[in-house]
Amino acid sequence: LRVGNQWVLYYCATETPQGGHHVVKAVTSPDLIHWSNPRIVFRASQTGTFGGPTESPFVVARDNKYYLFVCTNAPYNTSAAYVSDDPFSFDIAHTVMTFPAHGAEVVHAGDRWYVSSCGWEQGGLYLADLNWDDKT
């Protein structure tokens, strides 16, 4: 994602390599070669040392808002979206929706939006229309 004059890369992690809260971290770069130190941009309430509710983070900028999509893994084929005015600060209190998808990514093509779903034993990669409710 491009934010201002920097690129932002989001990834799932735990607070420390030894475990802790499941989080989404971000690093920034002006040139895609030199990267900043990571910062936590979303913290789930769950803890652990393996895949958790912050898997496959994907951020979309739309109408001066940022939407973080993550796979919650509760159950496996469930994702959630969170909204924020700040691409470096998302909160579970600002959940927009949960929906049936795993590893969701958003595609904007022309005037249409799509959300993908894929994963183990899902039988392929799927696309569905994504319709925005501008009241959120």
Image: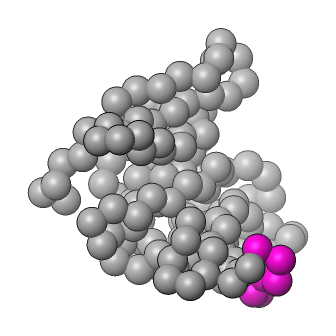
Give the residue displayed 32% in from the left and 69% down from the top. 65
- Residue 102 magenta-drawn? no
Q: Quadrant of residue 103?
A: top right
Q: Please provide percent x and percent y for residue 82.
A: 39, 60
From the image, which quarter does the C terminus lie in? Answer: bottom left
From the image, which quarter does the N terminus lie in? Answer: bottom right
Give the prevailing secondary structure in the magenta stretch.
loop
Q: From where the camera sits, is residue 94 visible?
A: no
Up-down: is 62 above or below 106? Answer: below
Up-down: is 80 above or below 59? Answer: above
Q: Quadrant of residue 128?
A: top left
Q: Please provide percent x and percent y for residue 84.
A: 36, 72
Q: Please provide percent x and percent y for residue 85.
A: 34, 77
- Most extreme residue toward the top, as rendered? 123
Q: Which residues are magenta?
A: 32-37
Q: For this rendering, which residue is in front, 111 or 23? A: 111
Tell whether 48 sits left or right of 65: right
Q: For this rendering, which residue is in front, 92 or 131? A: 131
Give the residue displayed 73% in from the left and 64% down from the top. 13
Tell whether 19 sits left or right of 90: right
Tell whether 31 sits left or right of 61: right
Up-down: is 78 above or below 23? Answer: above
